[in-house]
Image: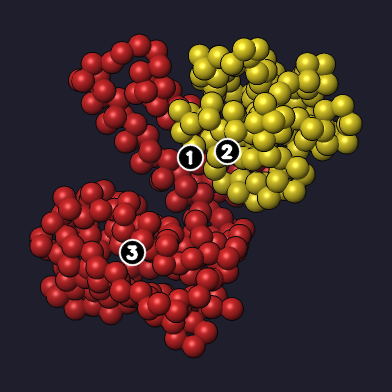
Chain colours: A yellow, B red
Amino acid sequence: MDTPHRILLIEDDKFLLKLYSDKLAREGYSVSMAITGEEGLGKVKQEKPDLVLLDVILPQKNGFDILREMKADETVKHIPVVLLTNLGQESDIKTGMDLGAADYLVKTDFSITKLPEIVNRHIKEAHGA
Amino acid sequence: MALAEQQGYAKLTDVTSVISHQLKTPLAGMKSSLEVLLAGDLGEISKEQKEYIQLTLGNVNKMILLVKDLLDVSRIDEDRFVLKPEKSNVVELVKDAIGELSTFAQAKNTEIVLDAEPDIPPLTIDAIKIKQVIDNILYNAIRYNKGKGRIEITLKNNDGTVLLSCKDNGVGISEEDKKMIFNKYYRSPRVISLAPDGTGLGLYISKAIIEKSGGTIWFESLEGKGTIFYFTLPAH
């Protein structure tokens, strides 16, 4: 990658935040982080990343609120969003996909080793890069 | 309950549910962390370190499966169990289950044979949940064999209903246990001595999944000879 793709990771669990951001950074991505919904939405609008990894349950503003606001904003609606969901929230997956998420990952089910590949695929699909 | 209320779980009415929800995020972190180590991302690991990490990861994955089961149970009990039906190929689900359990079957010296009629139609089912039922029935058939096991799975199209049967030549189910095996947390003292691991939730959850999908699940068994599990799924 010449100019590293920029990923915004919005996740309130600090352990997962470190694991996902370190993994993506090791693979050459430029990773920005937020731990609350408000902070996350602010960074989406300010930084306009190439992709957003978005937890659903967040303090202040949840992932669905962020997704809804992103899709209503012409300047950021094109940014692909991959939802990070928990076990037992399968019904949330449909809600998220209906709101326009590009994909979802169930945190306990997906393998972190596949994260860069998933992120890369969605960036290519959305930006043709 | 106090803990649930304090932590804002207003809708969750039992301990199982609260504990399961609290376990999910730390388990996800542990799994990812071990996968990173195993992949050698943080530096080369020795053969012995790899073995320890793999063993730990295996246990974390077991805990994740247990949490999934407990979450299913709490949803069944609170009548919040929702399926997401989509057009799916049930024959492929069975083949996937056989493939994934083939190492375990080999270790238990058990052969698995599949006989699917060619005209099995695509079904509108929750593929993940139906696969969970197939996994459970097949896993039990392998686990409770008597050595040199043989398992025959058939899929038939019976006028608007697809029938799956899974026949084994294992230890069978005693008359006493026959009344109990779909009960929540029930494990026969006899099978505990054969396979101490297990929660007694698999068949309870399987029954709920099949019935919620509009089908029926039942079995025939002769103690010492083997068992045939059946379930049906509507084709429309």
**A50 or B143, which is in the foreground?**
A50
Report the chain holding disc 2. A
- CA gap between label 1 and label 2 equals 8 Å
Q: Name the residue under label 2.
A: A105
**Amino acid type, residue under disc 3 in the picture:** Ile
Q: Nearer the viewer, mark 2 or mark 3?
A: 2
**B36 or A125, which is in the foreground?**
A125
Farthest-out residue, left:
B147
In the rendered image, the quadrant that contains the N terminus of chain A is top right
**Amino acid type, residue under disc 2 in the picture:** Leu
Q: How many labels does the image show?
A: 3
Q: In the shown orientation, is residue B150 left or right of residue B29?
A: left
Residue B79 placement (x, y as % from top left) = 60, 62
Which secondary structure lies at badge 1? loop
- CA gap between label 2 and label 3 equals 27 Å
Report the chain holding disc 3. B
Q: Name the residue under label 1.
A: A109
Q: Mark 3 points at which residue?
A: B137
Please rate how many residues cluster around mark 2, counting C-alpha atoms within 10 Å: few if below 14, some from 14 to 19, many from 20: many
